[in-house]
Image (spheres, rainbow, N blue to C red):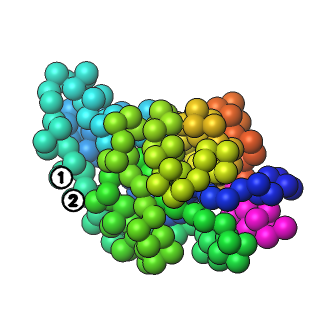
Amino acid sequence: MQGLFDACRVVLFDCDGVLVNSEPISLATLVDVLDHFNAPLSLRDVSDRFTGRSSSAPIEYIKTQTGRDVSGEFKPYYYKMLFDRYDRDLTKIDGIETVLTVLQARDIAFCISSSSSVERLEKTMQVTGLGPWFDGRVYSADFVENGKPAPDLFLHAADAMGYAPGDAIVIEDSVAGVTAARAAGMKCIGFVGGGHYADDREGASQRLYEAGADIVISDMSMLAQAIAV
């Protein structure tokens, strides 16, 4: 990873599974919600299908399985259950605030570029206390027509921050996110340190490399050290 940050002017962080250890919570909740809407999937299948995607993906899945359009019901039902669990269980990824501190020290800009909705991102920032680190620099899939794996969100975030794609490095935990970063013409570091990869870090690393990640890490201390050099 030596030299990767030499030309970097801005870092675009995914949120779920990168800044916060939310994926185990959200995936387990999504299993329960899909069961409620009569479109059951296993936890592994939910992870494979929906990690890194916006809420439109499970809504479309339910429609294909049941013929029912739940677009008006899905988000309120899902978010009520999810946010209750966030209040109880959501934590920051170990070492993320050290990474943000080192970025500030090196005068490298950073923001959030997430498939989550604005509402969910606001809840995440409130529960974890990460909000002040980003202070308005939070970009949601709500802002663009096409979510990940399309490059739209990363291109929008970089432009809003005032940088070209070649200035940016993306930190991502999902194949959809890595694919989007590469399509945007940005370098990408894969992160497999989240709880949802606890039993499959090697496999997850391989999938992110295959999607185009420049390097894959499992601990934020590795990222902090690379930035500080």
Q: Which residues are magenta?
A: 218-229
Residue name at image x 26 percent, y 44 percent:
33
Read off the residue under disc 1: 76
Read off the residue under disc 2: 80
**Would you call the spot at circle 1 few (<14 residues within 10 Å), some (14-19), or many (20 or more)?**
few
Which kind of residue does numbered mark 1 sit on? Pro
Residue name at image x 66 percent, y 66 percent:
108
| Residue 103 place in picture, x, y as percent | 67, 70
Quadrant of residue 110 in the image?
bottom right
Residue name at image x 17 percent, y 38 percent:
71
Q: Is residue 220 left or right of residue 26?
A: right
Tell me the SS state at disc 2. Answer: helix
- Compared with 78, 21 (above or below) is below
User: What numbered label is drawn on residue 201?
Assistant: none
Q: Is residue 163 left or right of residue 137?
A: right
Residue name at image x 36 percent, y 42 percent:
144
Query: Does the magenta-highlighted stretch encompass residue 219?
Result: yes
The quarter of the image holding the C terminus is: bottom right
Which kind of residue does numbered mark 2 sit on? Lys
Query: Does the magenta-highlighted stretch encompass residue 118?
Result: no
Q: CA distance from mark 1 to mark 2?
A: 6 Å
Tell me the SS state at disc 1. Answer: helix
- Check whether the beta carbons of the residues at disc 1 and disc 2 lie within 8 A of each other: yes
| Residue 77 place in picture, x, y as percent | 18, 51
Magenta segment's dominant SS is helix
